[in-house]
Image: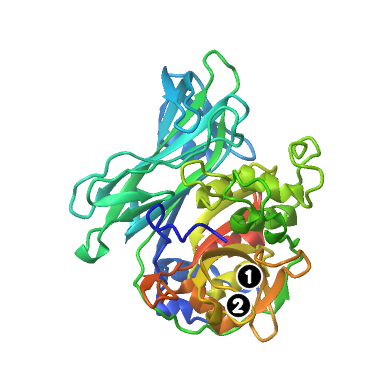
Amino acid sequence: MSRAEQPSRRTVLAAAVAAAVAGSAGPASADTVSSAVTDTAVRARPVDNRFWISYADWRGGAAKGTRAVAGTRPGLVIGSPVGTVDYTDPHTGRTAAWEYATWTSPVHGLAVPSTEVITSWNARTPGGTWIQVELKGTYSDGTDTPWYVMGRWAAGDQDIRRTSVDDQSDDKSSIWTDTFAIDDPATGLRLVSYRLRLTLYRKPGAKVTPTVWRLGAMGSDVPDRFTVAASVPGLAQELGVPRYSQEIHVGQYPEYDNGGEAWCSPTSSQMIIEYWGGRLSSEQLAWVEPEYADPQVCHAARFTYDYQYAGCGNWPFNAAYAATFKGLQGVVTRLGSLTDLETLIAAGIPAITSQSFLKEELTGAGYGTSGHLMTVIGFTAAGDVIANDPASPTNEAVRRVYKRREWENIWLRTKRYNASGKVVSGTGGVCYLYFPALPTARQRKALAAVGVR
């Protein structure tokens, strides 16, 4: 399970979807989604996704030492560094000099003035390189946020320790691990626009460079509620996603969030990575104790670990990890309904969802949680959810069928009662999507239907 039970370090995203979206009927297949329906769904969705991914996108920003590169997967690299800076890693105490170059996006006006924003990025960081992602926005009262650090990230852990940054606030908004959040949404204050700044680092004099293929953010503002409208089943299909249990790793590598008991996020990530054909070599797994089963799950935990959060549940870090596998990309977004999930499944795209619930609220789970990730792989003929639930005692037990009405409510609600009867946040439709770097036309249509390009 995740570490969402630590609200002082991270807020669970708490936004739900509009009733009309949650209650819409599901398509028989992704091919039935017309462009008109897609446009209407995106407009109705209380979520704004903006990603910079094309050569034109990278050429459109303000570059200082970076340059855009064309090709089948356009990206951004260091051209001529603009300076050198010393960085002291707060988790190792080591200080080192780094050359750097920057790229700043154009201002993006949020179609949905937002209470929360989560960034995502996909990048390659060879040894001796790393990146930093920052956000600066404008509020609805006309004032600006500071530049907030949304993550310092490297695929490896030898040069720097990937990390979120705590204690960032301006008394109007705060950064909670990976999430920008308005401190008091009841005031009506919202974020109406933002820019992202990307800084690419490498060792002085080196020729190697990070390459960033995708950068963007999801903003949202949806009303709080304890229940959501019931959706109508529209698809019976199951995808052949590998099954991995986090529980067989309990006690392994406790330096990464106390071992497997808290590895729901990387375990779910590894399932979908392997569904898309991502594999780790024996050399990459050589560090894992040979007697441990499924060493790739240990690897995923290590290389999604956020050293400040002290956990493997940083959402953008998981999406970035998935994108280190050849031919994959990943985003963090929010979906509006089980209809959205049906649209994705019909196109062959599984999803990782975040939910929280009491034991009695999800029949057959056998546990309760304040934050847990599962992999949705399909739907039964009755419309119930087929999920690979990593909180299972064995790999064979991972496949579960959960009642549709129970499942959609624990995933999409924004408020719930905990075991003590206190009102706490729900997860509000949070989702990771991993999909091919070159999606098929059908996959592109399904992604567009849920607001992702």
Q: CA distance from mark 2 to mark 1?
A: 7 Å
| Residue 264, position as x, y percentages in the image | 61, 59
Q: Which residue is mark 1?
A: 30
Q: Secondary structure at mark 1?
A: helix
Q: Which mark is residue 397?
A: none
Alpha-carbon neighbours of circle 1 within 10 Å: few (<14), some, or many (≥20)?
A: many
| Residue 54, position as x, y percentages in the image | 53, 42
Q: Relative to 99, does residue 315 appear above or below in the rendering?
A: below
Q: Is residue 108 left or right of residue 54?
A: left
Q: Is residue 243 visible to the viewer in this orientation of the structure?
A: yes
| Residue 199, position as x, y percentages in the image | 44, 31
Q: Which residue is mark 2?
A: 27
* Picture quarter with the N terminus: bottom right
Quadrant housing residue 386: bottom right
- Residue plotted at (62% across, 53% down): 266
Q: Relative to 16, does residue 141 appear above or below in the rendering?
A: above
Quadrant housing residue 320: top right
Q: Is residue 453 visible to the viewer in this orientation of the structure?
A: no
Q: Amino acid at mark 2?
A: Pro
- Front residue of 196/307: it is 307
> Mark 2–mark 1 contact, CB under 8 Å?
yes
Q: Is residue 306 left or right of residue 278?
A: left
| Residue 419, position as x, y percentages in the image | 45, 76
Alpha-carbon neighbours of circle 2 within 10 Å: few (<14), some, or many (≥20)?
A: some
Number of callouts: 2
Q: Secondary structure at mark 2?
A: loop
Residue at the front extreme of this rendering: 251
Q: Relative to 222, does residue 173 appear above or below in the rendering?
A: above
Q: Relative to 350, does residue 60 appear above or below in the rendering?
A: above
Q: Amino acid at mark 1?
A: Ala
- Residue plotted at (20% across, 63% down): 187
